[in-house]
Image (cartoon, rainbow, N blue to C red):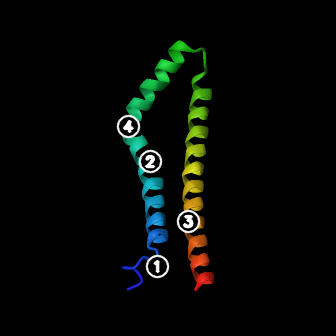
Amino acid sequence: MEFLTFDSFISIPVLIAFYYLGALLIPALLWTERSWVIKVTDILVQHFPIATSRLIIGFMLLFMFFELMWRMMFEMLIGYFKMIEYLHLIAS
């Protein structure tokens, strides 16, 4: 009954599931679309005098940064919902 009256949240397990879904699907999609990434790399190397190894390291660092931001976004949302549950517990 608490679920139907929104006294209990299902959001934390759902957020964790979406986090892992995204954490696994984003690298998988990048792997399947690696030809696009290679085309972008070739265009950048042609237009800018950048060494390919530096560009690859830059892409890897950017990828790790976005994975970290993905994790932090979900941690913030989970913390928010835990705070709401705790406030509901204090109020009752």
Point out the tag, 1 or 4, that comes first from the N-terminus.
1
Q: Position of residue 47 (x, y in %)?
A: 53, 13
Number of other residues with Cα within 10 Å of mark 3, as a class: few under 14, some 14 to 19, many 20 or more: some
Which residue carries the number 2 mark? 26
Judged by depth in the image, the label closer to the viewer, 2 or 4, is 2
Label number found at residue 78: 3
Pointer 1 or 3: first along the chain: 1
- Disc 1 is placed on an element classified as loop
Q: How far apart are marks 1 and 3 (CA)?
A: 14 Å
Q: At numbered mark 2, what does the secondary structure look like: helix, strand or loop?
A: helix
- Label number found at residue 8: 1
The residues tagged by marks 3 and 2 sit, at their Cα atoms, a distance apart of: 21 Å
Disc 2 residue type (three-letter): Ile
* C-alpha distance separating marks 1 and 4: 40 Å
Residue at image location 55% in from the left, 42% down from the top = 63
**Mark 2 Cα shell of 10 Å, populated few (<14), some (14-19), many (≥20):** some
The residue at which mark 4 appears reads as: 33
In front: label 3 or label 2: 3
Q: Nearer the viewer, mark 1 or mark 3?
A: 1
